[in-house]
Image: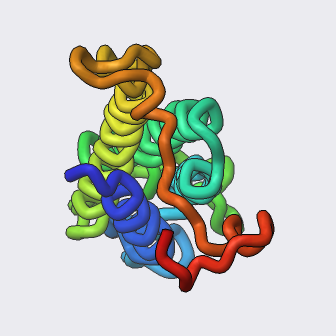
Amino acid sequence: MKRWWLWAGLGVMLLLIAAQQIWARGTWQDPVLGTTVVEATGSEVAGTLTAGALLAGAALLAGLVGSRPVRLAAAVCLAGGALLAGLPAVLTLGDPGEPLGQIARQRPGAASLSVHIDDPTTTLWPWLALGAAVLVLLGAVLCVLRWFDTGASRSPGGGAAATGTTPPGVSSTRRRERPRDPWDDLTHGQDPTVDD
């Protein structure tokens, strides 16, 4: 669960795929063509879906290569991208006829008509987009938790190495001793191969 980027990356990938798929369909009584099928893709239903996915993707890259402050900002952007992508999915699942009606009104000759969509239904893709937004939001939460864990691990501890004190029973001279290097002996004109 510590790999926040894995969940966020999976969510971004699913959001970009869902944007190109059909989210809702229904029928409309066209005054010229009669009963016609109206379909709406994710990008047509949710104008902020692709924007949220791209924002989350950019935040993901920034969080992977950035420092701790950048990672915190990336977590905030991930959460914002998840909201931008998830809210349209919730609205479409609640009322699929509204986006279908807007698409039908864009057809020639239908701008001045009262458009009523019959039998509006949703596909599986809005549910997958909502799940992908939840994954991005999970990645943001895990990124924040990772940010706090990294800060706690870098804080100074109470050990002897952190405080610079010498443990009891160990002299400071012994602590500073280092093994003799044969190259140092040669530098001082001594032959390290000859026993003292």
Q: Quadrant of residue 86?
A: top left
Horizontal side of 133 relative to 48 (left or right) equals: left
Q: How is the image coloured?
A: rainbow
Vertical arrangement, residue 29 with respect to residue 178, above or below: below
Q: Position of residue 150 (x, y in %)?
A: 41, 35
Residue shown at 35% from the left, 52% from the top: 4
In the figure, 60 relative to 159: above or below? below
Q: For the point 26% across and 63% down, which residue is it?
A: 128
Is residue 67 rendered to the left or right of residue 87?
right
Task: Looking at the picture, tell me which residue is in the foreground, 31 or 189.
Answer: 189
The residue lying at 26 percent from left, 48 percent from top is 93
Is residue 117 something that shows in the picture?
A: no
Which x, y percent locates residue 108? 70, 68
Does residue 53 lie above or below 166 as drawn?
Answer: below
Q: Where in the figure is residue 152, as x and y percent of width and height? A: 36, 24
- Residue situated in front as seen by the camera: 142 or 130: 142
Residue lying farthest to the bottom in this orientation: 193
> Percent from the top left, x then y, of residue 115?
47, 51
Q: Is residue 9 visible?
A: yes
Residue plotted at (46% across, 48% down):
85
What is the tally of numbered marks visible in this picture?
0
**Left or right side of 101 for 111:** right
The quarter of the picture where residue 12 lies is: bottom left
Closest to the observer, 76 or 144: 144
